[in-house]
Image: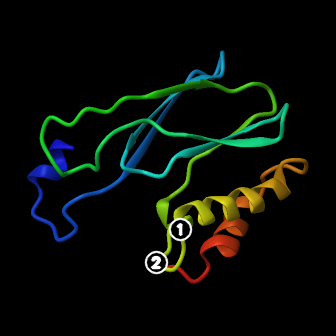
């Protein structure tokens, strides 16, 4: 945040998401700076859940505070972090973009996620710059 505040650039702000994951226990914390939420697929229910920390955009004001959301991954769970360009578009609501993303990601749950990133980009944001 401090770095962006010192820059003289046209955009003036940025979003960010940060994951801290304990690989032994599966416990995690997610910090967000105005970024779309992470998505957790619970393997037991097959349901996606939005996971988002609270925080302002980076580069907007000094002294910003960021509160984490905590969670845990069980065996078979999926945690998906993604760029906002994958779900945001000027002609649709972000919830529609997230719904489309999770629907496309569901195709990979049983087969594995090899090659999924490119497929998700093509399916959800092919025409986005």
Is 110 located above or below residue 126 in the figure? Answer: above
With 57 as the anchor, is 91 left or right in this view? right
Residue 115 seen in render: no
User: Which residue is more in the foreground, 7 or 128?
Assistant: 128
Corner quadrant of residue 107: bottom right
What residue is at 49 percent from the left and 39 percent from the top? 52
Where residue 91 appears, x then y in whole percent? 51, 80
Residue displayed at 15% across by 67% down: 9
Q: Is residue 10 left or right of residue 40?
A: left
From this viewpoint, which residue is outermost toward the right?
A: 110
Q: Is residue 60 left or right of residue 20?
A: left
Labelled pair 1, 2 in contact (Cβ < 8 Å) = no
Which numbered disc covers residue 128?
A: none
Across and down, in percent, residue 74 comes to: 75, 24
The spot of residue 22 in percent (x, y) is 58, 21
Q: Nearer the viewer, residue 93 or 3?
A: 93
> Badge 2: few (under 14), some or many (20 or more) residues near its Cα, within 10 Å?
few
**Closer-to-camera residue (69/95):** 95
| Residue bearing mark 2 | 90
**Residue carrying label 1:** 93
Q: Residue at x 55, y 54 (%)?
A: 82
- Label 1 crowd bin: few (<14), some (14–19), many (20+), radius 10 Å: few
Secondary structure category for the residue under label 2: loop
Q: Secondary structure at mark 1?
A: loop
Q: Identify the residue at image location x=17%, y=47%.
A: 3
C-alpha distance separating marks 1 and 2: 8 Å
Q: Is residue 89 above or below residue 77?
A: below
Image quadrant occupied by the N terminus: top left
């Amino acid at each position: 945040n401090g770095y962006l505040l010192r820059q003289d650039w046209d955009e003036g702000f940025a979003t960010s998401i940060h994951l801290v994951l304990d690989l032994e226990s599966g416990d995690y914390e997610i910090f967000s700076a105005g970024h779309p939420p992470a998505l957790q697929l619970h393997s037991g229910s097959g349901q996606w859940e939005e996971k988002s920390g609270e925080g302002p955009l980076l580069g907007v004001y000094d002294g910003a505070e960021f509160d984490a959301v905590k969670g845990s991954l069980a065996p078979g769970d999926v945690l998906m972090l993604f760029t906002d360009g994958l779900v945001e578009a000027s002609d649709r609501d972000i919830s529609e973009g997230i719904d489309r993303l999770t629907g496309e990601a569901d195709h990979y749950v049983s087969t594995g996620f090899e090659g999924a990133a490119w497929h998700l980009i093509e399916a959800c944001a092919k025409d986005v710059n």
